[in-house]
Every structure is written in structure tokens, then in C-alpha cells.
Amino acid sequence: MALPKRLSNRYEIKARIAQGGMGEIYKAYDTCMECEVAIKVMHILPESKALELFEREWRVLAGWDAPHVVTIFDQ
């Protein structure tokens, strides 16, 4: 899936860094927070169960605060 160079008028996409079963991970620059971020994008519009799993994943991760775990800033 090719992403535009900029998402939500906030994230400047730099490169695709990984691909998995549910989607792709991109390296980007967050122009609001002025830092590099990773963006996970789903491959296709999934069925409701897959979307539930994706949402549950980011909600759980958003609650973690550990030095080697990513911080969720936006969904």
C-alpha cells in the first residue's frame, strides 16, 4: 500500500520499515511534537473482529509506560 507523503496534515512519511500480517509500519516525522514516530497502517479495511483486535492492541499499549515499549500518541 502506498501512503501519501503526509498524513493528517501532521505526519511526514519517511520510509516503510516493516510489514506484518495486519499491516505495515512506517517511519515518519510528527510535525506537531517535532520528533520521529512509527505509524502502523492496516493493509485493508478489515472485518469487525480484526478491527476490534487492532483497537484493543493500541488501547493496551497506550496504557503502558516502560522504557522499551513504544508510546501511543494518536490513533
Image (cartoon, rainbow, N blue to C red):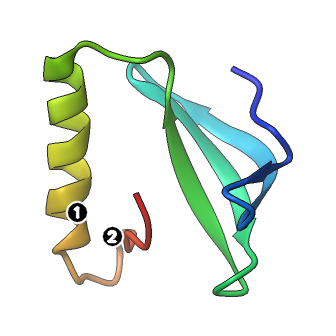
Upstream in the sequence, badge 2 or badge 1?
1
Mark 2–mark 1 distance (CA, rounded to whole Å): 8 Å
Depth order, front residue of 74/23: 74
Q: Which quadrant is home to the C terminus?
A: bottom left
Query: Taking 48 as reference, is 59 above or below it?
Result: below
- In the rendered structure, which amino acid carries the disc numbered 2? Val
Relative to 12, 67 lies left or right? left
Q: Are marks 2 and 1 in contact (CB under 8 Å)?
A: yes
Query: Taking 2 as reference, is 47 above or below it?
Result: above
Badge 2, how many Cα within 10 Å: few under 14, some, many 20+?
few
**Disc 2 designates what residue?**
69
Percent position (x, y) of residue 2?
77, 25
Query: Taking 48 as reference, is 26 above or below it?
Result: below
The label on residue 61 is: 1
The image quadrant of residue 33 is bottom right
The label on residue 52 is: none
Percent position (x, y) of residue 21?
39, 19
Depth order, front residue of 46/14: 46
Badge 1, how many Cα within 10 Å: few under 14, some, many 20+?
few
The residue positioned 18% from the left and 19% from the top of the image is 48
For the view shown, which residue lies furthest in the front direction? 9
Relative to 6, 1 lies left or right? left
Relative to 45, 34 lies left or right? right
- In the rendered structure, which amino acid carries the disc numbered 1? Leu
Q: Secondary structure at mark 2?
A: loop
Relative to 13, 45 lies left or right? left
The residue positioned 16% from the left and 33% from the top of the image is 53
The residue positioned 79% from the left and 45% from the top of the image is 15
Depth order, front residue of 48/71: 48
Percent position (x, y) of residue 12?
80, 60
